Amino acid sequence: MVGYVFYLDRFNGNLRGLLEKLDYLEELGVTYVHLMPCLKPRPGDSDGGYSVMDYRQINPALGTMGDLETVAAALRQRGMSLCVDLVLNHTAKEHDWAQRARAGVAPYTDYYWMFTDRREPDAFETTLVEIFPAHAPGNFTWYEDAGRWVWTTFNEHQWDLNWTNPQVMIEIIDVMLFLANRGVGVVRLDAVAFMWKRLGTRCQNEPEVHQILHALRAASRIAAPALIHKEEAIVSPQDLIPYLGSGIHTGKEGNLAYHNSLMVQFWSALATRSTKLMTHVLASHFPKNFVNATWATYLRCHDDIGWAITDEDAGALGISGPAHRNFLAEFYTGSFPGSFARGDLFQSNPLTGDKRNSGSLASLAGLESALEAGDDRAEATAIQRILMGHALIASFGGVPLIYMGDELGLLNDLSYLEDDHHKHDSRWMHRPKFDWVKAERRAAPGTIEAQLFGGIRHILTRRKAMPGFHADAPTELLQTETDGIFAFRRTGPIQPVVALFNFTENWLAVPRSWAAAVGVRDFVDHLSQGHVDTPNDVIALPPYARVWLT
Ligand code: GLC
Ligand code: GLC
């Protein structure tokens, strides 16, 4: 499986427009299509569609429920899965339930978290964090007409649902099965970490969240057993694992979850040219595989990058956590001396020192600065960085997700600053309109587009040919002794595959004896489909090399 993630309006207008572009997706190797939020959003700013006012209607700008069913059928014919967002932590304040709750109508007043005074909100606020401190500070909003404070973790217009109310669960299960009946194959359960509130905690990843998700999965197993649950939890490694099932939830919770740590460590290692922290984190916190579940691997998505590296992990390598996170934020805005990246900050919080970043894959990886400088060598290097990343997410284990336009090297798009509904949110800089003129250039050898699109397609084709990359094949991290090289072994049914990645712009070497000791026998690289020579008894790895060795 290979996923592709995109906004319908920004890709080719609407649902009908998508039908015209299925050949394009098939050419790339895509078998799973995630339509960014397409259910009816509130008018005006809707947090990119994550503020839903009607779960049973398609956003009229994108088409109708009938169009969605047509798309689902067309995808099915090509062996492609349809993934749709199910936002279940909150609804838009314009949702029918919320409007009734606001008017004081039972039972809807129990669908949300509403308070007549500040006592409880104040008590909760002592331990809550702010998700959008810059444009939506605090976690509660006062509504004069209702005479109530309402829990609004994200934006003011996104009202948190009260999952202690069993009626909420029944409503959402009903919506979930409604979508499955329209032909949706994967539900992306948005912001699940926040579903349960407990005084004195951050109100994230509470045990009840897993019980609810377990119950949702049981419901679809009974009524729509092919439905895949993808859980969006951008949390620390320890908190993330239960979403794919551990302990009593093994094999029973999410089927897919974003590998946020792999993504963060990819960018961290690119900036530092050191793979020690990456290897340490991925080796010490994650199981080698899951039961009935796997990762969604990715390099970029529609959201910001939060530098989720703990002080303990940084400390284990003698690095200061706050200093390293601050360095990464500065590096990926491009302000750190020598940085190849072009990006921006997202929601920096002066109180906590927390800084996150926005930026497209290509711009963060150095393509924008190379083009700006007219530097051919830097351009070639940026392309190698990007392809190395794609080879990483294709082989690490799980379903790689390609974010719209990354296969063509789309750069940061600053036009969001002219849009009143978007200018407060720098995540829009990496949500560019798809560029079909650039897409045409994928057929012109030597262009950036041809190198990236062709390179990614090649990686995906080779991946498909490797039984060792099946999601059931464990991923074991390997220590290489050569800093700058990241390595793991996949032990599939036939023979182990050892994947090596050079995170630097220098040639690096790995001893032949090391490779033999971790199971490399015939010294074939299945990515370039060539024999790897080992003069001087070393495997020589060019800048940003990636090899899949048996
Ligand atoms: C998820 C989405 C993000 C959105 C948030 C609130 O994290 O990915 O874009 O802002 O949920 O719905
Ligand atoms: C998500 C994540 C957070 C992200 C936010 C909006 O739920 O928890 O990391 O910044 O929503 O993008």
Image (cartoon, rainbow, N blue to C red):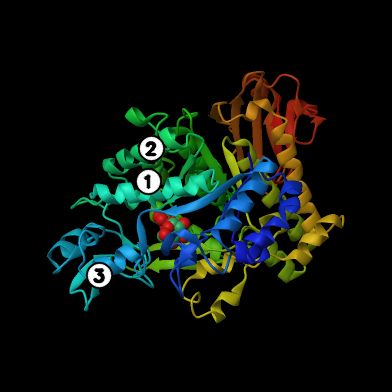
Q: Dot 3, crowdedness within 10 Å: few (<14), some or many (≥20)?
A: many
Disc 1 residue type?
Answer: Ile
The structure residue drawn at horizontal position 50% and vertical position 80%, both measured from the top left corner, is 420
The structure residue drawn at horizontal position 31% and vertical position 44%, both measured from the top left corner, is 209
Quadrant location of the N terminus?
top right
Q: Dot 2, crowdedness within 10 Å: few (<14), some or many (≥20)?
A: some
Q: Helix, strand, or loop for circle 2?
A: helix
Residue that mark 2 sits on = 219
Badge 2 or badge 3: first in the primary sequence:
3
Q: Are marks 2 and 1 in contact (CB under 8 Å)?
A: yes
- In whole angstroms, how far apart are the C-alphas of marks 1 and 3? 23 Å
Report the side of 193 relative to 304 (left or right). left
Badge 2 or badge 1: first in the primary sequence:
1
Report the side of 440 relative to 111 (left or right). right
Direction front: furthest residue: 66
Q: Helix, strand, or loop for circle 1?
A: helix
Relative to 96, is 518 above or below? above
Quadrant location of the C terminus?
top right
Can you tell me which quadrant of the image ligand 2 is in?
Answer: bottom left
- In whole angstroms, how far apart are the C-alphas of marks 2 and 1? 7 Å
Callout count:
3
Q: From where the camera sits, is residue 285 visible?
A: no
- In whole angstroms, how far apart are the C-alphas of marks 2 and 3? 30 Å
The structure residue drawn at horizontal position 46% and vertical position 66%, both measured from the top left corner, is 41
Task: Judge by depth and name the residue closer to the eye, 430 or 368.
Answer: 430
Q: Dot 1, crowdedness within 10 Å: few (<14), some or many (≥20)?
A: some
Residue that mark 1 sits on = 173
Percent x, y of residue 520: 68, 22
Q: Are marks 1 and 3 in contact (CB under 8 Å)?
A: no
Circle on res. 102: 3
Disc 3 residue type?
Answer: Arg
Relative to 51, is 316 above or below? above
